[in-house]
Amino acid sequence: MRYSIDRFEGNFAILEAENGETIGVERARLPREAGEGDIVVHEIGEFKVDAEATAARRARIREKMEALWEK
């Protein structure tokens, strides 16, 4: 399952699934380098940052923001 890291609240990360549902996960279960906005994949009881998906998502958001500012 893929999630985006929405935010951190204390010792928990709030993750949003592709279907829009949110879950809270102990921050310690995520890789140290994981940050807000990163895409993480949960496989076999472990979370891993998907750097390629994260970069693509950030590029899409940047394009949308630039389009908004051009209007």
Image (tube, helix red, strand yellow):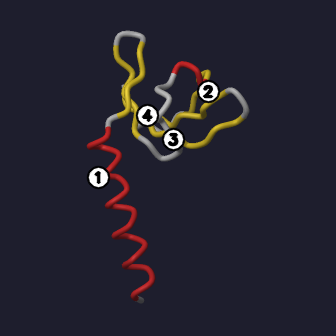
What type is the residue that disc 4 sits on? Tyr
Is the residue 23 above or below the residue 51 in the image? Answer: above
Choose mark 1 or mark 2, whichever is in front: 1
Is the residue 56 above or below the residue 46 in the image? Answer: below
Question: Can you identify the residue that label 4 sits on?
Answer: 3
Quick check: marks 3 and 1 in contact, CB under 8 Å? no
What type is the residue that disc 2 sits on? Gly
Q: Identify the mark nearer the N-term, 3 or 1.
A: 3
Q: Identify the mark nearer the N-term, 2 or 4.
A: 4
Q: Please, what secondary structure does the residue beneath circle 4 have? A: strand
> How far, Cα to Cα, is label 3 from label 4?
12 Å
Question: Can you identify the residue that label 2 sits on?
Answer: 24
**Which image quadrant: the C terminus?**
bottom left
Is the residue 18 above or below the residue 58 in the image? Answer: above
Q: Going by the image, does 52 lie left or right of 38? A: left
What type is the residue that disc 3 sits on? Gly
Q: Residue furthest bottom?
A: 71
Query: Which class describes the residues within 10 Å of circle 4: few (<14), some (14-19), or many (20+)?
Result: many
Question: Can you identify the residue that label 1 sits on?
Answer: 56
Residue drawn at x 38%, y 70% is 64
Q: Please, what secondary structure does the residue beneath circle 2 have? A: strand
Question: Can you identify the residue that label 3 sits on?
Answer: 35
